[in-house]
Image (spheres, grey):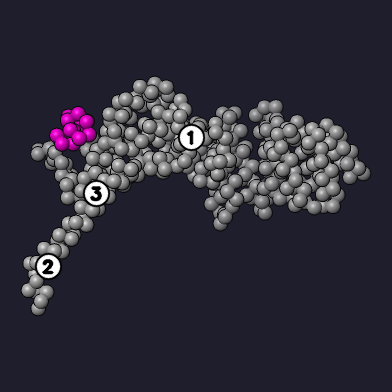
Amino acid sequence: MEQEKISDFLQSQRDAAPDDLQHYFLTFEDYQERKLWHELTDILVQYYNEPGSTSQRIPIYNNFIKSFADKINQLKLVKVGLSTATQCKDDNERLNFLTTLTSRVDKPSSQDAYVFALTSVASVRLRLDQTPEARKDLDKCEGILDTFDSVETVVHASFYRVSADYYQSQHEFAAFYRTTLLYLACVEIEDLTQEDRRRIAYDLAIAALVSDTIYNFGELLLHPILDSLRNTEHGWLRDLLFAFNRGDLQAYNILQSHLQANKLLQSHQQFLYQKISLSALTQLVFSRAPQDRAMTFATISEETKVQLDEIEHLIMKALSLGLLRGSIDQVAEVARITWVQPKVLDRPGIEGMRGRLREWSGGVERLGTWIEGVGKDVWAA
């Protein structure tokens, strides 16, 4: 009797489906009757990925899939469930649907599926401004993920994506920056839409600039996601990041007119000036040979274009942030730097490094020649 009801349901859905999708329903019934759960699961995932399946996702899930939901791969069940949830009329209905799905897969043998579903619950909660509840869900997911030796990247990607959304909503820029880069490590850039790539690149760039703990943008500058801003209305943001990386105050002065386009950048203008001044200082130190890093305040001011009366405070700030190590002679107005934080090199920086290595190699060769000439009697003995 049950099988007859399923057959009748599938027949009615097949008649209502677009012509190019009707063949799926014959396969559904065949695999279900033969209990080929793995094959049935894969064909259902394929069907739910079809744009033309949208209007039938909820009835098929409720009247067909739920009858054998415990028999199929639970992670794929969640994938199908997430596709179904996109058709709910609003986020409240979607939250109820996903909460039920999460409870269904909350079993010791399917904790990966449980985390996958729970991160989606947290995502909906964020949209409904249920922030504390979303944070609890994410903490629970993180605790479970820490117990896994391995898990499918789609689960980690979902966790990092929703966590990044949480941090962005709380203006925790450094955490958002790190978590979004982890998300990007779990997905193929080509699988993201052009719109998503640009949005992620834009948000990452803003977070990198306004964060008070991120002074090295190397990982972002090298990431292909940033190229999605090329030749767009936000292309200036990419240029601004590279200007910050090389400590180029002149380029910053040219580009700062664009800061009015973003409220966060606009409200952080004073901080951004200090940040690029610090970058100019570290770039100056980085460009000098280790034995040539004792500099007067006047020299630093001339080369970085930072006002002379701001230099001492700037150096102290760099030392306190761990960007530099060294000491300041306040009387003589001299800074002696012993270490500078490594940074990503652009082409001119690589050329400069190449020149310094050549200079070092020549120095070693000259020293060897001198030792050989001065000590030839010793070598003969």
Q: Is residue 301 magenta?
A: yes
| Pick the front one: 356 or 327 | 356
Residues in magenta? 297-311
Label 2 sits on residue: 372
> In x, y percent, where is residue 59?
79, 34
Magenta: main secondary structure equals helix
* Three-letter amino acid code at the position of disc 1: Ser
Query: Tags 3 and 1 in contact by the CB under 8 Å rule?
Result: no
* Three-letter amino acid code at the position of disc 3: Gly
Mark 3 or mark 2, which has the lower sequence index? 3
Label 1 sits on residue: 228
The residue at the point 20 percent across, 35 percent down is: 303
* Mark 3, secondary structure of its residue: helix
Q: Residue furthest bottom?
A: 381
Q: Quadrant of residue 361?
A: bottom left
> In x, y percent, where is residue 104?
71, 44
* Three-letter amino acid code at the position of disc 2: Glu
Label 3 sits on residue: 355
The residue at the point 24 percent across, 44 percent down is: 287
Rounded to the nearest angstrom, the CA distance separating label 3 from label 2 is 26 Å
The residue at the point 27 percent across, 33 percent down is: 277
* Mark 1, secondary structure of its residue: helix
Q: Is residue 235 magenta?
A: no
**Mark 2 or 1, closer to the camera:** 2
Rounded to the nearest angstrom, the CA distance separating label 2 from label 1 is 57 Å
* Mark 2, secondary structure of its residue: helix
**Mark 3 or 1, closer to the camera:** 3
Rounded to the nearest angstrom, the CA distance separating label 3 from label 1 is 33 Å
